[in-house]
């Protein structure tokens, strides 16, 4: 039973997938942040969010062992 619960955490990886799946969300130039167009800083933000989600999934799945 614990093995099945462990796999539930992997569904959290859907969040970054959906955030970058639809280019209509981020295919624009404005607003800019520190001179970077929206397109770039939006994707950089998702790289950071994906790392955080990966860390959360890792620690949640390791705590069940």
Image: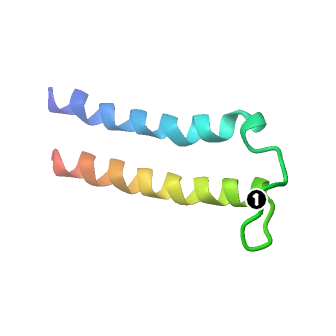
Give the camera-side residue of 31 and 6. 31
Residue 10 image position (x, y, % from top left): 39, 37
Residue 62 image position (x, y, % from top left): 23, 51
Q: How is the image coloured?
A: rainbow
Q: Residue at x 26, y 46 (%)?
A: 61
Q: Residue at x 81, y 61 (%)?
A: 37
Is residue 59 placed above or below 10 in the rendered structure? below
Q: Is residue 16 left or right of residue 9?
A: right
Under circle 1, the secondary element is helix
Residue for badge 1: 40
Residue 60 image position (x, y, % from top left): 25, 48
Q: Residue at x 81, y 55 (%)?
A: 30
Give the camera-side residue of 18 and 60. 18
Q: Quadrant of the N terminus?
A: top left
Is residue 40 placed above or below 4 in the rendered structure? below
Q: Residues within 10 Å of mark 1 (few under 14, many from 20)?
A: some
Q: Is residue 45 left or right of residue 39?
A: left
């Amino acid at each position: 039973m614990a093995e099945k619960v462990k796999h539930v955490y992997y569904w959290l990886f859907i969040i970054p997938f959906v955030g970058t799946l639809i280019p209509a969300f981020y295919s624009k130039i404005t607003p800019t942040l520190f001179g970077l167009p929206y397109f770039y800083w939006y994707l950089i933000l998702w790289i950071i969010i994906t790392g955080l989600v990966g860390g959360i999934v890792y620690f949640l799945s390791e705590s069940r062992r």
